[in-house]
Amino acid sequence: MSRRAVAQALALALLYAVMVGSFHPVDLSVGVVLAVGVMRLFPLAGLPPDLHPDERWRRMLHLPRFFWALVVLVARSCTQVLLIIFGRNYRADHAGVVEVPMGERTARGVQVSSWVMSLAPGTVLLELDWERRVMRMHALDASDPDKLRQQQENFYQRYQRAVFP
């Protein structure tokens, strides 16, 4: 293990200890085991992208726009979920599973898209099918699957692609 990986594992273990509210050696040991497991499950999360400095600055300039679009997406999704819950026309049979193509997303882009998908209320990522290059998500209102796919693709193309391709 590199020094960087050891530092990341220790940082995650300390975060675990703070979350459980105990620095007992057993809790710290459990935190280290969990940290190593998380680092093995999500190997791309700790690797910085190998970018030219100009590209790094370009992405940083687009980051505020991405975060603002994310805030707007979450607010709109909250409103939609409230309308589904308290609206008179809610039908349970509108909920369902929709497959969203990964398209041209890189592995990191798929991770960020998955996170965005699960962060927005009303949708949650169920599975990543790398062989078919499909993200399977559950939506409270899946009555129009093509519209959901288009919304995911539009968010990626307009806001995410410039920062996390």
Image (cartoon, rainbow, N blue to C red):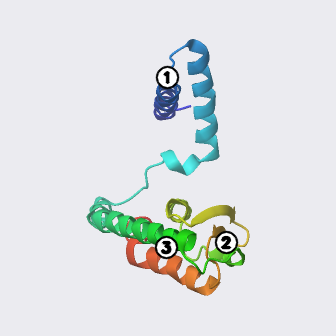
Judge by depth and name the residue closer to the eye, 108 or 122.
122
Instruction: Write down the residue under mark 3.
Output: 80
- Quick check: can you spot residue 165? no
Instruction: Write down the residue under mark 1.
Output: 21
Examine the image and state in which quarter residue 134 appears.
bottom right
Instruction: Estimate the x, y position of residue 144 in percent, counting from the top left.
Output: 62, 85
Between marks 3 and 2 in the image, the one whose residue lies nearer the viewer: 3
Q: Amino acid under label 3?
A: Gln
164 left or right, relative to 68: right
Residue occupying image coordinates x 58% and y 40%: 39
Q: Tag 2's secondary structure?
A: loop
Q: Which residue is at the far front?
A: 88
User: Counting residues from the N terminus, which is met first, the one under dot 1 or under dot 3?
Assistant: 1
Instruction: Write down the residue under mark 2.
Output: 133
67 left or right, relative to 83: left
**Could you classify mark 2 by the number of other residues whose Cα lies within 10 Å: few (under 14), some (14-19), or many (20 or more)?**
some
Report, in whole angstroms, how far the alpha carbon at label 1 lies from the one at label 2: 40 Å
Between marks 1 and 3 in the image, the one whose residue lies nearer the viewer: 3
Give me the disc on residue 145: none
Q: Tag 1's secondary structure?
A: loop
Q: Amino acid under label 1?
A: Gly
User: Counting residues from the N terminus, which is met first, the one under dot 1 or under dot 2?
Assistant: 1
Instruction: Estimate the x, y position of residue 146 in percent, counting from the top left.
Output: 61, 86
